[in-house]
Amino acid sequence: MKNNLIPAIRLTLVCLVFFCGIYTLSVFGISKLVPDNMSFAKNNSGYYENVGQSFTADKYFNSRPSAVGYNAAGSGGSNKGPSNPDYLAEVQARIDTFLVHNPEIKKEDIPSDLVTASGSGLDPNISVQAALVQIPRIAKIRNLSEKDLELVVQKLTEKPLLGLFGTEKINVLKLNLAVDNL
């Protein structure tokens, strides 16, 4: 019994020191290096940057569709597979709506993130391609040059963490606020 009890106590003490001390401090240190995703952007009414929102006016960049109606009280996907007829009809309706508002764009040039919801249904970001494809519409409505809007998109493009993790993305709220300030 003594042969089993002493190693078990040692292992318990080592695990206690490691998980309560070293591991906890390591995770805390890494969390301080990662950008803060809980920031708060304020305009006249104030919106959270980390929650997707609906922008339907043609003068704004469209955000990613939401499976939960942009209701931050509960996130979730539609749980419909890519062969589900209801899902396909929903995506086709989004494509048709996008083409009505952006007639100069071809169907095959529409980025998937503009017609499919994210897993959480609350993704506040779009791809750089999704922003660039909307520039002609916004430039025409706002009487701005496409070059000015491209510069704003470039300025607000968030690079992958450490250049490795994730993809380039743009926060739609920040982008729309910056375009409002032009």
Image (tube, rainbow, N blue to C red):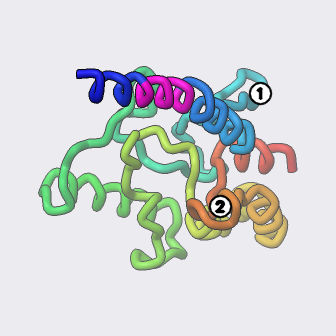
**Seen from this angle, which residue lies furthest front?**
2
Q: Name the residue under label 2.
A: 160
Q: Quadrant of residue 39?
A: top right
Highlighted range, magenta:
10-19
Secondary structure of the residue carrying numbered label 2 = loop
- Rendered location of residue 104, percent (x, y): 54, 75
How crowded pointer 2 is (Cα within 10 Å; few <14, some 14-19, many 20+) is rated as few
Q: How many labels does the image show?
A: 2
Instruction: Name the disc covering residue 136, or none.
Output: none
Residue at x 65%, y 61% (from the top left corner): 160
Q: Taking 14 as reference, is 156 above or below it?
A: below
Q: Residue at x 37, y 55 (%)?
A: 116
Q: Can residue 49 be seen in this view?
A: no
Residue at image point 78% right, 63% down:
149
Q: Which amino acid does label 1 sit on?
A: Lys
Left/right of residue 174 with respect to residue 121 in the rendered view? right
Q: Give the quadrant of residue 93.
A: bottom left
